Amino acid sequence: MRWWKAVGLAGAAGVVATGVVVVRAERRRRAYTPDQVREQLHVRFAQATSAGSVETMAPAGPDGRGIVARLRRLFRR
């Protein structure tokens, strides 16, 4: 078998494997009812907003500066 045939077969196998992964993900996504999707989005939103409030109250670092001041100094360079 020539090398280009092996490369072609490997490429075809990769395309088939990618298609299988996409089809599985689509089946899982379509298995939910709209109410279940809405509920999951509400849960994720609640988690994101509660995590965001915790991050904004981050304590100052060991040098006495807050995270915002350290980021400004980093991007100023």
Image (cartoon, rainbow, N blue to C red):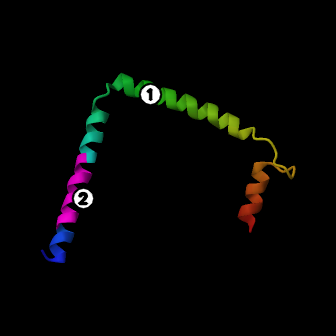
Q: SS class of the residue under badge 2? A: helix
Please tell me how crowded label 1 is: few (under 14), some (14-19), or many (20+) other residues with Cα within 10 Å. few
Residue at 24%, 52% (x, y): give it. 17
Q: Is residue 10 magenta?
A: yes
Percent from the top left, x then y, of residue 3?
Answer: 19, 76
Is 76 or 31 nearer to us in this picture?
Answer: 31
Residue 14's label in the rendered image is 2
Task: Quadrant for the C terminus, please.
Answer: bottom right
Please tell me how crowded label 2 is: few (under 14), some (14-19), or many (20+) other residues with Cα within 10 Å. few
Task: Kindly check if marks 2 and 1 are in contact, taking CB atoms under 8 A apart as contact.
Answer: no
Q: Is residue 16 magenta?
A: yes
Outermost residue toward the front? 1
Residue 40's label in the rendered image is 1
Task: Quadrant for the N terminus, please.
Answer: bottom left
Percent from the top left, x then y, of residue 5?
Answer: 15, 72
What segment is highlighted magenta in the picture? 9-20
Residue at 20%, 54% (x, y): give it. 16
Name which residue type carries label 2: Gly
Q: Nearer the viewer, mark 2 or mark 1?
A: 2
Outermost residue toward the right? 64
Residue at 50%, 27% (x, y): give it. 43
- The alpha-carbon separation of the residues under discs 2 and 1 comes to 33 Å
